[in-house]
Amino acid sequence: APMTPKDRMYPRSVRREELARLQQMGVMGIEVDFFGGDKQATMQLYLDLFEDAADYGIMVNVHGATVPRGWQRTYPNLMTAEAVKGMEYVTFDQRNADQQAHHCTILPFTRNVVSSMDFTPVVFNPRIRGVQVRTTPAFELALSVVFESGIQHFGLVPEERPLMPDFVVDFLRKVPAAWDDTRFVDGYPGRSVILARRSGETWYVAGLNGQNEAQTLAADLSFLGQGRWQGDQIADGANRTFDLTPIRTTSDATHRVHVPARGGFVMRLSPAN
């Protein structure tokens, strides 16, 4: 199907007319794709787009775009940007899919430090457009926490619902896109990463194994407050399934998870009653 509408974001008169129409329709946000490089005119187009969209109360996500340069500070309606070889790129070629786990354990140290990143993560289908997905389901689920994006677009399609147990659906419904605190727990670019993010009183801890062999990931939980904490862990089960385990712990514990090649895990912890 053709991609439409086209050429509605310039010149300014056309852009503001389109934004006014979208506002009247009740549209809250737009994704603008296919920007033409980093020349001065294009860089100015970004800024003009963000400013005009703010006038109409419309959020913006840019794809096919350059890496933002602190733009979210000036224009908080810029929610996220692609600016990365994301899940779409993974599906283009088997060689890309073969490198995905390694790639995803580099991005938390590089691209995602600069600004919000719309990787379009979380894919549970084992094969997409003839490309074999190499990462495990728990690895994909962990991306929803490891990658920060002001709006998190999961790469799921309805046909994947039978692959998702109810506790995974519940996790995806509740996982925040905005965080009150973020802690680097452990990792090394290209090998593994563990990040902890807090929303309210709840901590989400996620780990990725970027290597082609199993390894044990260790999470120092000293970032937790005093007292006991409880929750659950979702990790990899046998034959591309999920394993759900209840967790009770304290801040002086080190939580260890045996993670298969290109696998991952997530934990959700709240203060125990």
Image (cartoon, rainbow, N blue to C red):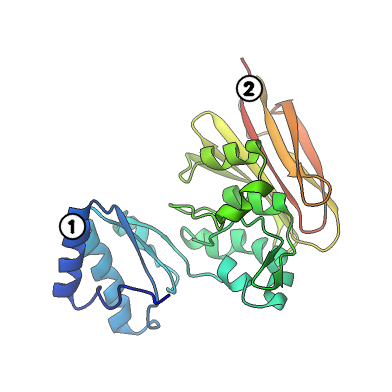
Q: CA distance from mark 1 to mark 2?
A: 45 Å
Asked whether the viewer can see residue 131, the reply is: yes
Judge left or right: residue 248 versus residue 25. right
Q: Residue at x 49, y 60 (%)?
A: 117
Report helix, strand or loop for mark 2: loop
Q: Which residue is mark 2?
A: 226
Name which of mark 1 and mark 2 comes first in the sequence.
1
Q: Which of the pair 225/97 is nearer the observer?
A: 97
Asked whether the viewer can see residue 221, the reply is: no
Residue 55: mark: 1
Q: Position of residue 126 (x, y in %)?
A: 72, 61
The three-letter amino acid code for the residue at tag 2 is: Gln
Residue 45: mark: none
Q: Residues within 10 Å of mark 2 (few under 14, many from 20)?
A: few
Q: Which of the pair 154/139 is nearer the observer?
A: 154
How many numbered marks, from 0 up?
2
Report helix, strand or loop for mark 1: helix
The three-letter amino acid code for the residue at tag 1 is: Asp
Q: Position of residue 80 (x, y in %)?
A: 42, 59
Q: Position of residue 131 (x, y in %)?
A: 69, 72
Q: Position of residue 144 (x, y in %)?
A: 58, 50
Q: Which of the pair 185/232 is nearer the observer?
A: 232
| Residue 119 quadrant | bottom right
Q: Residues within 10 Å of mark 1 (few under 14, many from 20)?
A: few
